[in-house]
Amino acid sequence: MIDTQSTPAGSMQNRDWQRRLIHFLGQRGFVLIFVLWVIYLTFNTRNFATVDNILTVLRQATIIGIAAIGAHFVILMGLLDLSVAAVISLGGVVMAHLMIAQGVPPLAAALLALGLGALVGLLNGLIITKLRINSIIATLGMSSILTGIAFTITQGRTLFGERGNNPIEAIHFLSRGRLFDMIPIPIIILFAFYIVAFVILNRTAYGARVFAVGNNDRAAWLSGISVDTIKIATFMLAGTLGGFAAIMQVARQGTATAGMGADFLFPILTAVVLGGASLTGGRGRIFNTLIAAIFLTSITNGMILLGIGIHTQNIVSGVILIVALSLDRLRTTLS
Amino acid sequence: MSFLEIDRLSKAYPGVQALKDVTFVVEAGHVHALVGENGAGKSTLIKILAGAVRPDSGSIMLDGQPYHPHTPRDALAASVSTIYQIFNLLPDRSIAHNVLLGREIRGPLGLLDIGAMHRQTAQILEQLYAGYLSPAQPVDSLKVGEKQIVEIARSLVNESRLMIMDEPTSALNQVEATALFNVIRSLRQQGVTILYVSHRLDEIFELADTVTVMRDGAHIATQPVTGLTRGLLVEQMIGRTLETIFPPRQATTSTESLLVVDELNSGNRLIDISFTLNRGEVLGVAGLSGSGKTELGQALYGDQRIDSGRITLHGKPYNPNPGKALRNRLVYLPEDRKGEGVFQEMSIRRNIGLSVLERLTGLFGFMNLRREREIAGQQIRRLDIRTPHMEQEVLNLSGGNQQKVALAKCLSIDPEILILVEPTQGIDVGVKFEVYQFIVDQVAAGRAVVLISSEVSEILGLSHRILVMREGRIAAELVTDATDQEEVLRYAIGEARPAAGTPHVLG
């Protein structure tokens, strides 16, 4: 009796589980490509599917991933922040400069980098809401200003500490440290940030307001939401996260240059878009952005393992972005 | 053989059988009315005819040919045009560009002949009794009623054989509606067949030759209008008999003024507006479109710039702004509910929750999601919002239920003053009565309602006092019991002069 009942129930559950898996794979085009890529690398490289390499991928995903949280919030409102890469550059340069040339304590320098990011976000927010300038244009202009300042500080040089007396070593633990000698600290930071971001978006009034503004800012205003305040606060959040990404990057390379953030702009925005956040706002899942950030890092990692050059990597990244988004479009058209 | 033959058409959406074996015919050159409550399946049927949705089964014959449009373009190619409730206009382009979209007039060198386009558009607007609109004006600057006129003008250009009109008068005032009826009659004379969806039974009796009733996705009856009674038609629509149209109005007893407006000015839209709103009363605001009645509602909620004037709310000076209004329990139901009253891509739960966010928020800004579900559940039951569950996104609801969500957002904050702009626009008889009952209940509970409406009968049936607006001013303040439809209309149009010594005429 028990057997005859449990068998169909079991297979039902099994089928339900399969359906969910298929649904998840089909939900975002890139997830399928990601799975195929992982399978391919597992069989065609010696090192990809090792614990060490997987931890390396996750560590490398930290900077893109953290900055992408801010980009995700901004895109949820239907806006874009193109200044994040410049915030990473300027934040890194300012922090390194303060520590190396001015002898500012590492903690204070790091806090200043965060404050700088917040200030840039505040300016972005004010320009966009009060002067009513399109966010793409406003943050593009801001980006140019910040990069200009960064180059003025460095004069084109790489900032690094003297051997034996390098103050940047004080923050190396953010990149190289391991909890219980096992889990790298950047990975813990990455996942912790995403969990907090998830909670903020889905469990707080601020998160509800961000979605509301992105969904329909007229209706949000008529619902008594001070739309401008939400926009400014979100740009400040994005700027602060950019500042944090700058700290992590300085900790990782041990040096700072005025161009250190430039290469991050594409993967940061790509992660959010691949993750399925709608560019018109109101829709997006934060953990999909995290998965996309890890995927993008695994592309670079995998191609290095396969011995493919840096320029080809850029081509492949662009192709994958377009193919993945086309799959999504195809899926919505078919259904 | 009939002009349009609809045969056993069925269509299911997740959780809803929108159409069930619908079969009926439409004769050539008729104005054929299609009526039914929200969720009756009218919209689905229209979308199928317009090529926007494909049926699951069934067939359609148009003028003896199988007609199965896969896209709206197919429908247009078969000379079937549709005027939807939601406008399909390019907001930044001029009226002329919109009316002649895809049929632009070209001069030598293939460049657009703007002059000729403006002339042709002006001619069509004249035909629609809207000659006061300039063809060069961007559509964005128009009021809802005027956008509807542009929409209709566009389908006139398309020289359709079958014209489907989905509640074309829902946003029009009586003058505009009368003008539209004349246009429809002249189209009928030219042999155009018109499928006319409306909730206003008066219009159907005035205009239609034949009427089809649908209910819960099924075809109920197709019959000639001649010989049909209102009562029978309503009975067919709702499946029961409807007694009175307006619930009984209770006399106001309170003289406590909740809202005092003194010499309010906003450009040339609102000029020297002064009035008082008392607890327990419905204050009707009547006027043609463009009279400033909509702007008055917006101004009280902070959605319209105010140049001068004083507003006192609950005895304190009040500088309108939505956040402040809501904290003072003044709510506003905007005219464009689909676009401004609700968040289309959010759940019913969150739509309601966003209105009461401050009450749901605790330590560190965390939301009490359980409380949100409770409040949303209460409102869904109270307003009888038809939905499988509260996680349903608003865009999946029928028009009437979307309106109820907008109302639920207002109600959930436990308002004292409700500013309702066209609260029954585009909803059908059964729900309309629910909204009337809702308004009467509000004032019975000691709240006050500002009822801004283009339907004079509705204002007369519900209000205690009536402000009639014309050209931005209050043309008259009338006591409902001492006035009638004709007087209200005369003030609205501007033919009446205040009679000396008549006590209820103040302006």
Image (spheres, rainbow, N blue to C red):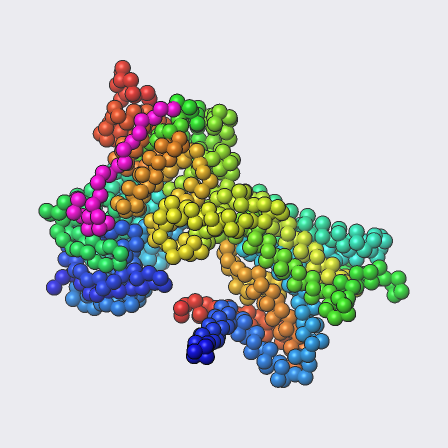
| Of residues A58 and B243, the one drawn nearer to the viewer in this rendering | B243
Q: Residue furthest front?
A: A1
Viewed as shown, does residue A297 lie left or right of B445?
A: right
| Residue at image point 58% right, 63% down | A287
Residue A272 image offset from top left, x and y in percent: 57, 62
Highlighted range, magenta = B230-254
Q: Residue furthest top?
A: B501
- The residue most toward the left is B227
Name the residue rendered at 21%, 65% in the picture: B8
Residue A285 in sight in this render: yes
Counting from the top left corner in percent of width and height, residue B294 is at: 38, 36
Is A278 rendered above or below residue A123?
below
The residue closer to the viewer here, B158 or A98, is: A98
Q: Residue lying furthest right in this view?
A: A164
| Camera-nearest residue between B168 and B364 | B364
Q: Is residue B238 magenta?
A: yes
* In the image, residue A192 above or below residue A34: above
Classify residue B265 as left or right of residue B503.
right
Residue at the spot x=20%, y=42% of the render?
Answer: B202
User: Image quarter for residue A99?
Assistant: bottom right
Dominant secondary structure of the magenta stretch? loop
Asked where in the image residue B486 lies, by quadrant, the reply is top left
Q: Is A235 in front, or is B150?
A: A235
User: Would residue A121 be found to the left or right of residue A112 on screen?
Assistant: left
Where, by quadrant of the figure, is residue B60 drawn? bottom left
Q: Which quarter of the image is occupied by the C terminus of chain A?
A: bottom left
Q: Is residue B158 visible?
A: no
Quadrant including the N terminus of chain A: bottom left
